[in-house]
Image (cartoon, coloured by chain):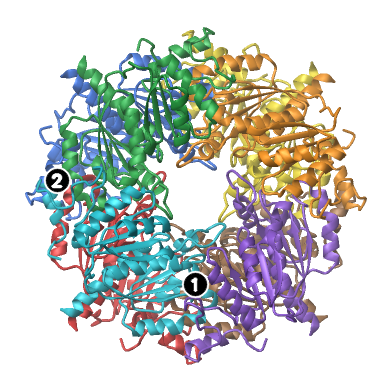
Chain colours: A yellow, B purple, C brown, D cyan, E red, F orange, G green, H blue
Amino acid sequence: MGHSPLDDLVAAVTGRAADGVDGIANGQARPDVTREGRTGVPEIIYASGKDFDQVLALTSTFVERTGRAIVSRIDDTDARCLIDRLSSYQAQHEPRARMLVLRRPGFRPPDGGRVGIITAGTSDLPAATEAQVVAREMGCVVTLVSDVGVAGIHRLFEPLRAMLDSGVDAIVVAAGMDGALPSVVSGLVDVPVIGLPTSTGYGVGGKGIAALLSMLQTCAPGLSVVNVDNGVGAGATAALVANRVARARRT
Amino acid sequence: MGHSPLDDLVAAVTGRAADGVDGIANGQARPDVTREGRTGVPEIIYASGKDFDQVLALTSTFVERTGRAIVSRIDDTDARCLIDRLSSYQAQHEPRARMLVLRRPGFRPPDGGRVGIITAGTSDLPAATEAQVVAREMGCVVTLVSDVGVAGIHRLFEPLRAMLDSGVDAIVVAAGMDGALPSVVSGLVDVPVIGLPTSTGYGVGGKGIAALLSMLQTCAPGLSVVNVDNGVGAGATAALVANRVARARRT
Amino acid sequence: MGHSPLDDLVAAVTGRAADGVDGIANGQARPDVTREGRTGVPEIIYASGKDFDQVLALTSTFVERTGRAIVSRIDDTDARCLIDRLSSYQAQHEPRARMLVLRRPGFRPPDGGRVGIITAGTSDLPAATEAQVVAREMGCVVTLVSDVGVAGIHRLFEPLRAMLDSGVDAIVVAAGMDGALPSVVSGLVDVPVIGLPTSTGYGVGGKGIAALLSMLQTCAPGLSVVNVDNGVGAGATAALVANRVARARRT
Amino acid sequence: MGHSPLDDLVAAVTGRAADGVDGIANGQARPDVTREGRTGVPEIIYASGKDFDQVLALTSTFVERTGRAIVSRIDDTDARCLIDRLSSYQAQHEPRARMLVLRRPGFRPPDGGRVGIITAGTSDLPAATEAQVVAREMGCVVTLVSDVGVAGIHRLFEPLRAMLDSGVDAIVVAAGMDGALPSVVSGLVDVPVIGLPTSTGYGVGGKGIAALLSMLQTCAPGLSVVNVDNGVGAGATAALVANRVARARRT
Amino acid sequence: MGHSPLDDLVAAVTGRAADGVDGIANGQARPDVTREGRTGVPEIIYASGKDFDQVLALTSTFVERTGRAIVSRIDDTDARCLIDRLSSYQAQHEPRARMLVLRRPGFRPPDGGRVGIITAGTSDLPAATEAQVVAREMGCVVTLVSDVGVAGIHRLFEPLRAMLDSGVDAIVVAAGMDGALPSVVSGLVDVPVIGLPTSTGYGVGGKGIAALLSMLQTCAPGLSVVNVDNGVGAGATAALVANRVARARRT
Amino acid sequence: MGHSPLDDLVAAVTGRAADGVDGIANGQARPDVTREGRTGVPEIIYASGKDFDQVLALTSTFVERTGRAIVSRIDDTDARCLIDRLSSYQAQHEPRARMLVLRRPGFRPPDGGRVGIITAGTSDLPAATEAQVVAREMGCVVTLVSDVGVAGIHRLFEPLRAMLDSGVDAIVVAAGMDGALPSVVSGLVDVPVIGLPTSTGYGVGGKGIAALLSMLQTCAPGLSVVNVDNGVGAGATAALVANRVARARRT
Amino acid sequence: MGHSPLDDLVAAVTGRAADGVDGIANGQARPDVTREGRTGVPEIIYASGKDFDQVLALTSTFVERTGRAIVSRIDDTDARCLIDRLSSYQAQHEPRARMLVLRRPGFRPPDGGRVGIITAGTSDLPAATEAQVVAREMGCVVTLVSDVGVAGIHRLFEPLRAMLDSGVDAIVVAAGMDGALPSVVSGLVDVPVIGLPTSTGYGVGGKGIAALLSMLQTCAPGLSVVNVDNGVGAGATAALVANRVARARRT
Amino acid sequence: MGHSPLDDLVAAVTGRAADGVDGIANGQARPDVTREGRTGVPEIIYASGKDFDQVLALTSTFVERTGRAIVSRIDDTDARCLIDRLSSYQAQHEPRARMLVLRRPGFRPPDGGRVGIITAGTSDLPAATEAQVVAREMGCVVTLVSDVGVAGIHRLFEPLRAMLDSGVDAIVVAAGMDGALPSVVSGLVDVPVIGLPTSTGYGVGGKGIAALLSMLQTCAPGLSVVNVDNGVGAGATAALVANRVARARRT
């Protein structure tokens, strides 16, 4: 963690070629391999819309240079191909979340904090799992509780109490459709809550739009949000918070 | 109530001039004075966008022919002028809801049912009061509970239990901003819930849009909605339901 | 029906494990098996976006614990698989509405009220049938009249008169495109009307958006709405109303 | 009417300065004084957003060169000032529609056809009157029927029958809120209908948006629309149609 | 054509069963077989979203009772099946416009007027052809000119002049993307113009939205519009106008 | 801070009246005076849309029971009246941010953490100051840097370096118009960033909409957002994070 | 012009305080006084939403350090106050465009190129004049032609020919409502065209939205756009192009 | 280039058949073969939504009459078929950008200027390549730099400096998601920048909408934009500018 924020910038502007600003493969990608040191969040390769060769080149680069590659929005076929092509690495594949992690044997994320994830329904699990994987790769211990939405709000309280008792320092609340759960949770706890709207629901306000707007309009301050289905963003934010608290506790 | 639905239609189509289809004053308004008999909901004069003379003419017509006139969206000045000009009638004015009711002395609404109204915040009171006045004029006994939104959801349960115990047959839940409360209530009770979004809140999804969308996307079936700030519609719907149940109980 | 509203809540908050708050199968779903007792609306399993195993686990749980499972938005293949896998139960499948109901032999819904359903066109039948199935499973007798939209409004009056004569206590009116029919009906009858916009129509305002907006903007108070294609919500709301009136009549 | 379509174009492109392409006053406006001859619709000066001097200059130009000036969206004060400043002309002012017409004494519009205008409510009268003035200035005989919206649809039939019997060749139907009336009318008559949405209504779909969308989504072919509150466009379209039929009848 | 507007209504309301209000086949469709007599526009069967059996039943009903059936939005396979199943009728199939017309041998549309259709690009031809078929079936002689959009506006003038010289009484102008052509044409001619936006174009404002909005905002009065890709509506409107003028000329 | 999360809920559901669930004044407001203990964020009285008497009653209640009242969105006149009426308390008024804080003499917020606030332009200062006041009242030391937007991005680096060196644990970045700055900052630092879009900018995407969307679409994970102009939410979130880290450091 | 792009960046990142990154007055504004040297576009002070003191401080700073200050969106009163307070400078005030320019006596913009500006109507003049002032201050000779919109397109050709003959190297085309003119112009000329939508027009697509979308959807490549009413952006873009060509011609 | 702007117009209006206004093949397309001479931008055949025969006819016409045909949005299969069918021409196919260029042997574009293209990510390459091909076909030398988005902004400066040093006269900046890069670049350089939003990103503001809005709201004047994924428009605009400068340099 000796690599400090803004160092890359100085190096780049003054012409000292920072590691990571050179292109790869076809000269078109410029993988930001120093991102984790600079921002605390590892680069996550967004596979959607890239062809397999681009994903393969980026994945190899990251796993070689940093010991690990994290790929999001990758379909099953491509994930299995990647695992085959990079078989000397250890793979962890979460098909439901379309996440794939490859690690050099022996690689271990840094020690991090404690993060809680709550979902309103089972349909929110893909986005919630994306958040879970990212937080885990940032070193967090993650507790996930699902299907406690407001249509039967009595289901919420017991698991929430247990989660608070376990000492989480940030909570991601994933909800689609009405998006009401994050506001309810944020009004009950003293932990920063990150609202993660999910693309469930049909009709007007469907695909997560009502959920996002309802969270943006929350009457419970302390709730911030990420975009619909952006589990990566929610997990990274929660982990940044939790890791910071954990680091403070350790010092 | 001898006037049954569709009678007006037959009369009109076959050329027998039904009461109420002739114009008034300047020949431009055709007050629907048989609406209450036909639909169970009295005509409500929407003052916004009409000039004072139009409102006065309509109000006189209704109070003369039906014994009562209900005016919505009327500003204070116009309301006071109307009261002055029609001083032989009894006036009930709710400035916060911009509602004015004029009644012939001795007028009494029919006996109706029991309606509950809940608001998430105090800013929802104008729309909630509009609903309250309409339900009351349709003969309902109305219980109103306010400021029990999800940012402090513990405030909800005691008043809600009391409302259910009192025997309401329909509940209007008014909420702006996140619009989460109607879904929570609808998941807790066995009474039809009418969501009434209100135009509170700023930014994206503000002015009641997020609230409306969140209610439309509710995960708690049994919740139907009306448009933002449409207290008239919410009150009329709740009263139609409650009155129907009450009538059934009486028979 | 001895299970009263808010009981689940007290049990949950005070730590007495209410039936239904424990997870199933993979520990991720928390089926709300007490919902029908609490809210009068049975849990309806929303199959869209869930994988077959999730749907199967939920369906088994409900049919075992409550005697019946209702599944919505299920495609033909999955429906047939479910029927095969749970062949000891009686199946009722409505492919057009993508609804499947499984019942333990001898299961009978409670006695309910009378609901009417009207559609503007034949394209509105899927959503209307979804509403019909839900109301029927809530014990209602349902009358359905279709294809009487405003492009040929003379087709409406005779069937509407017959429906009113049969004693319906709530009417669902399904319409896509211009969404004009619910406002016309609501101005003609003294029964609560639930507008059910459907996703027919193309171009600007298509997929039910114009229909929903037109219903929200209705000039005929007494009309409340649910979201586009939300037959479940429309049917549940109408049945809650009709059942409440029927119960009142019986007492 | 000897000036035929496309003549202006040929003159302009080949450099023969057509009357009307030279600027006026401050050199910034290029009044299209040959428009009526070319398109059958007189130039209508849109006052909103122009300062008084611009409106005065344009009005003088038109009344001088063509014998008449038609000004829309002009507030009362400016209208009265214009009348004062151009007092040698005959003024006809419709404050409700914010229309002002000035005519050289003796000016007479050409003989035109018969146009019908129907409004759903009295709030639709400003836009409807704008249409009425434009059609009248294009030589039409105009019949206006108001306040026959679908909330009490029995009010519609008698006036509609009378209007058809009078021989109208085009009907403008103005409606705000749900915008349902134009579709109903278009399904009942064999005359082209022009839908004129008006900016009445609040909440989502308010200010005429739901009305416009509902008309665009009409299930009754033969209905075309203009923009919200565009009485000028509706009146001009209806008059173009009616005048064309009238001219054909005369030949 | 002895069947006059509103007759159906009187018959229906007074209980005299008008021809066409009874259901067919499965009791769900109520074909409006008297529409052409009442409104001048034949019923057009909208195949999209209906299953083949529904389309077949409706098509048979219309072709048997009225001598012709017009089907829109029908895909190639279904069209060919229909032709096979109803092989005793004469078929005219326009795959590009997804229109199918079946006629009893000897059927002849009534004599109508003259309609012009102009397209901005070749991509507008499907919608334009839909309009062409409808106008033709309403008895019109149709002139179609394509690919004269504003990116090369010099291409417009010669064909437009020819079209005006041929005596058209209404012009449909189809345009996608910028939707500029209808405003240009409407400013050049003295014939009513119907703007037909088409779903060409991508990005923000794509799929015809910018085109529709631009036409609604036209600065050239005399232009009315129908929804995106609504060739049926545009053709019917233009034909209603042209037929009315033609009828007037003949008398 | 002995009051722990969920305690209020248990008390409310089991009928033991928790402090704060009783109404005040006119019986309509239910001030949530235990919110700060429960959630770490003090109740903030939203003055907009409330009348002066409501604001006064709420303010008195809070300042009396908790030693401080924080009022947001209060105009100058009302703020000065409040200060007058409650002159025994110490007032701190930030007119630019429309914030007013009243404190009982001797009141001191708890010790908190370090928060940084950055603005893209000077127009973002009202929202940024709202965030600053809230964070300060939650006990934070706040560093504010303004006018370093991306149109001249060289202005950013020096102040950002100083801010990081001072040890902030959360950064709020306020930006309107293009909303680009939060993404740039989030890609440079290892601190959680809260994007605060502001309602600057006109035209399409104006009033903060483009800014909000751009932040939601950030390519720099670790950025979460609040709604447009929601300085209260941004400040509360940042302070919750920073306070949690500070508390960890102290233990 | 010795100050080259990216120099400011290097200076800032490496800690050498570039001129212009220090704050002024109240420490909150960081005027970018080197912008003109770096980007070729002078800083333009956006007065809207700033209080008078902020505008005064910024204006003084710029006029002192660079010899000129350009203020946009300034109302008449503030403009006159500024002129009074900075009376030693030469003022040029364009109230219609809400632009104010102050210059040190003897200040002269650099020599630039030739820019043309065309408007569809006279209502587009405020935005067009804003563009004109900015281009002029960047040293351009500007030709402005107004009121040649597509409703009477014959008015366009002669002035356009003259403008091309005068040698303009970039053309700004301002249009509201239908926004059709920029596409027509772009299809006729070989000069880059910048579309400037203006906020004229009402109803759906009003306030410049339809105009902007129509320009974005143009079928005439070579047209790029700026936001609604963004005369500053249009003028700056056109001047950057024209100045670059002029500079090339001079070398 | 002897064919000058407006010549086509004069020829068309005066009836002298300009080359290119006659239809081809099926009489429906009117290829604008003189566009390049008139506007400096060659006609680009938009294949999407056209059937193969239409594309083939247009491609043959252009390659025969002008020596080259440029086809955009063509899928791989159709491109390969075209190459086969027109095998006497030289083909250049860019599958990623869905562009195909066919040239008569010996065809050479005119000499043009220098254009730079920058992308924020590798997902922006399809749109960027579309721009590259168009600029190249207009004779430009194009430098493309990719994957330098603001999440790691240090990657931008070195390649940007090199691009400026190479003498580009216009820069296209392609970005999806947050769309922040064009504003950053426009604030750093003195060259006109064309923002090219791309359809990357999901959730609210996805598919390039946030990117487009952020660019329209840029705080860096000198940035104009084209629609999402409109590489053709961006490339044509940049090339028009660069070619104009180059031509000026040569004279």
Provide the secondary structure element on which disc 1 rests.
Answer: helix
Q: Amino acid at mark 1?
A: Thr
- Alpha carbon of mark 2 to alpha carbon of mark 1: how far? 51 Å
Residue D135 image point, x, y percent:
31, 69
**Residue type at the position of mark 2:** Leu
Q: Does residue D112 lie above or below D75 as drawn?
A: below
The quarter of the image holding the C terminus of chain A is: top right
Q: Residue D224: tell me if it is visible.
A: no
Tell us which disc is closer to us: 2 or 1.
Answer: 2
Residue H91 percent coordinates (x, y): 23, 33
Q: Is residue E107 above or below residue A80?
A: below
Q: Give neighbour class at mark 1: few <14, some 14-19, many 20+ (Cα, 10 Å).
A: some
- Looking at the image, which residue is at 17% across and 18% down? H250
Q: Chain of mark 2?
A: H
The answer to whether residue E52 is seen in the rendering is: yes
Q: Quadrant of the N terminus of chain A?
A: top right
Relative to D132, say whether A112 is above or below: above
Residue pictured at 20% horizontal, 19% vertical: G249
- Mark sitting on residue H29: none
Q: Which mark is residue H9?
A: 2
Q: Which residue sits furthest left?
A: H16
Label 2 and label 1 in one chain: no
- Residue D225 position by quadrant: bottom left
Residue C122 numbered mark, or none: 1
**Mark 2 packing: few (<14 Cα in 10 Å), some, or many (20+)?**
many
Q: Quadrant of residue C113?
A: bottom right
Residue at x-position 90% and y-position 34%: F2
Percent coordinates x, y for residue C62 in the rendering: 75, 60
Please, is residue E103 above or below residue G156 in the view? below
Q: Position of residue E158 (x, y in %)?
A: 13, 55
Left or right: B64 in relation to D10: right
